[in-house]
Amino acid sequence: MTLLPVLRPFLFPLCLAAFVGSAMAQPSWFGRWGGLDLKDLIVPLIQVITFGMGTTLSPADFTRILKQPGPILIGFVLQFSAMPLVGYAIATGMAFEPEVAAGIVLIGSVSGGVASNLITYLAGGNVALSVTMTACSTLAAPFATPALMKLLAGRLVPIDASGMMVEICNMILVPIVTGLAAHEMLYGRRAIWKSGSTLATVTALAVGLAAASGSLPVPLALRKGLIIGFLLLGLVALTKWIVEIILKREGNWMDAALSFFSMLGICIIVAIITARSRDKLIEVGPKLLLAVILHNAIGFWLGYGGARLARLDERTARTVSIEVGMQNGGMASALAMGVMNSPAAALAAAIFGPYMNVSGALLATWWKRNPPKDLPPESSTPSR
């Protein structure tokens, strides 16, 4: 037995730990590079990560809502009720200062994290269901997250709900829509997507739309989102043209590339936040880590318990548990830094993100070794 298969689920957490350690030891590395404030990279990195998520989605992931409404509804309700309420209870019960407490509520109020799909796969859960649940909570986030923050965190600090809604649309909705278009281009069976002239046209059109988006009469945040979204779509078309048409190479090369850049992006985001909040993190770190452990564990427990109370099978209950317990730390970080302008509010996300990957990997390892007995195995690969 080689060591690599055993360590594979923990490679991402180990990379995160390396970035966090570097940020704690040398915070200047993640501050400014010349005239560039690395904080300004957080939102574009979230957009790239969300775009990558969009490229994995297909119409089947949305029609699954009609086929499996029960588990999706249970996960959705727990995601946007239990997690924010538990976060608020922990934050106020442990008497955190207002900005840090608001950050704990924020991590409980965002959508499910994309990493939940990987953890579900490692646990032998229903990956297709996990993908659909993540997509549903992500699409609801522009409305649910600002409302929950206004209701709960608004008791602690001022909350700009409208600004938060615009920023989430910028970070989430635009990249997902362009990612869906990229999915059709990458995996669609139509002959048109095998044509070099078509891909060249899409590349030119995407660049033109990105340029035109800069003058649209919409909020600046949305203009930036449209520009990034169209540029990413053009980059995918150009890369497909070069790799498949010119170099004649097939395979899921884009999946591997986007997975790598998504993981790297998350590591960079966490490192930037850690570097800016280093002193505060040292001050409240142990106490905040305990809060994060409680929040994450209760989320896993409520997801599993709620699903079993609803008489869902073991495999589905595990999937719901993972989906509820794992949050979109990147979104929470970007909202804390960009809309709330508070490195202190971003601390909870900076800790929750790395920790949930470790706890999720451990839970997945346990469940993988103890497969459910109440259902025959089925494909755990999401449809294209």
Image (spheres, rainbow, N blue to C red):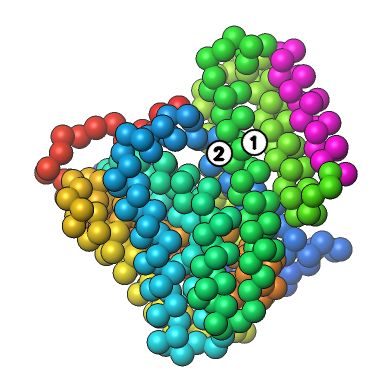
Amino acid at circle 2? Gly
Q: Are marks 1 and 2 in contact (CB under 8 Å)?
A: yes
The answer to whether 71 appears left or right of 384 in the picture is: left
Q: Which residue is mark 2?
A: 54
Specify the quadrant that holds the N terminus. top left
Q: Residue at x 64, y 51 (%)?
A: 169
First in sequence, mark 1 or 2: give its number: 2
Q: Quadrant of residue 380?
A: top left
Examine the rendered structure and indicate whether residue 92 appears above or below residue 185: below
Q: CA distance from mark 1 to mark 2?
A: 7 Å
Let me know if residue 122 appears in the view: no
Residue 231, image x, y percentages: 75, 37
Q: State whether residue 305 is above or below residue 8.
A: below
- The percent coordinates of residue 29 (x first, y second) are 71, 67
User: Magenta span: helix, strand or loop, mainly?
Assistant: helix
Instruction: Provide the residue span drawn in magenta.
Output: 196-215
Which mark identifies residue 167?
A: none
Residue tagged 1: 178
Residue at image point 20% right, 34% down: 377
Choose top left, top right, bottom left or bottom right for residue 207.
top right
